[in-house]
Amino acid sequence: MIEYRDSITGYSVRRYTEGPERNAKLYFTCENFSLDDRYFFFMKQQLPGRDDGGCYRADVETGEITRITDNRFRGFATDREKDIGYTCMNETEVYAVNLTTAEMTKLGDLPKGGQITGHLTAANTGRVACSYHLANKLYALVIMDPGKEAEVVYRSDYRLGHAQICPTDENLIFYIHETEGDAFQRTWMFDVKERYVRPYYVEHPSEWITHEVWAANGSEMALMKLDPAGFVDGDKGEIHTGNIIIADKDGRHFDIAATSEQLLHPCISRDGKWLCADRISYLGVNIQEGVVLIERATGKAKLIATTGSCKTGADHQHPSFNRRGDMILFSNPDENGNAQVCTIDLKQVMKDW
């Protein structure tokens, strides 16, 4: 672990890893920290000729790193309310992981011959859900209740991804039609009991909706509404706006909570008062990349940490808050564009907010 002062924002940042491999934080759509905020979790890329890939736990204060799972496991995600993680071995075997002891308990098996298309997610009842690519090449939503076999609850010939069960309502599963870009209708909500699917944010042809995340209490979601047409802003040239939209659980009410340039992945603090997002070069626009903090009550947005440029989508910054909401974890691409995990303590930011 090293600590350095950001040359542009002036704030102190801690970096916990270095290459040559990618060391990327967990995706922003799940918790990244242990219940006590002592540890965060990240994924180490497996390089040829080595056997050190997998999920790792890092001590926030000391930088000490402990391996939690090896490279056989995929889809690791932490629980919203319990100190456990969920992961998938050999594509189909689902395990719960004690985040303190790293002890594993097998929960069951996903349908044979398939693979998950994102990370696992869990509701507060213990129901695990994921988007899945079946052996017959159809896509599906799959649930696994405690003590029961996995169940395919929905099938589609669209590529399904970003599945997120509502943290406090096991009956609702959010998912997307994954195009790796714009979609005619990207966001969908599935009702498990009724076996009913409906659009969540109903898109118009000119809209580009992307990168959605549940609030920890399951009452709302944040999503990005991009403006690919761009606008001219002084000497900066063409800049694309990113609107962070906050929507209620049912997808009936949508408010623009913040607007800033080149935003992409939003996240909500557990108290609901703050948002963060990464600022990224995309759609032909180059900009100083970094992490933006946003006060929800006022919409004030401030660049608090700058980063390198990402080599791939897996190297995006994907910022998210710790559970107390006083720290942001993010990936900072190194000189080769590979993600390396960093934290920024928000107490220093609040002094001059």
Image: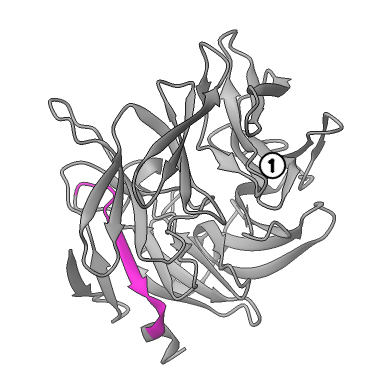
| Residue 294, image x, y percentages | 54, 74
Q: Is residue 308 visible?
A: no
Query: In percent of the image, x 41 and y 67: which residue is there?
Result: 328
How are the residues colored?
one colour
Residue 182 appears in view: yes
Q: Kindly state the secondary structure of the residue where label 1 is placed.
A: strand
Q: Amino acid at mark 1?
A: Phe
- Residue 98 or residue 318, whichever sits in front: 98
User: Which residues lie in the magenta part?
Assistant: 336-347
- Residue 343 lies in the magenta-colored region: yes
Residue 205 in the image: state x and y as whole percent: 74, 42
Instruction: Tell which residue pokes out farthest to the top in this image.
Output: 136
Q: Nearer the viewer, residue 61 or 160?
A: 61
Foreground of the two, 55 or 303? 55
Q: In the image, is 222 to the left or to the right of 110?
A: right
- Where residue 176 appears, as percent x and y from the top left, is 65, 37
In the image, taking residue 2 as reference, residue 225 lies left or right, namely: right
Relative to 332, residue 7 above or below: below
Count all numbered tags in the image, as a single digit. Answer: 1
The quadrant the N terminus occupies is bottom left
Residue 249 image-quadrant placement: bottom right
Does residue 57 sit above or below 45 in this rendering? below
- Residue marked by disc 1: 174
Q: Is residue 8 magenta?
A: no
Density class for disc 1 (Cα within 10 Å; few <14, some 14-19, many ≥20) is many
Give whichever of 245, 111 is nearer the camera.
111
Which residue, as the protein is rendered here, is positioned at the far left?
A: 49
Q: Does residue 128 sit above or below 218 in this rendering?
A: above
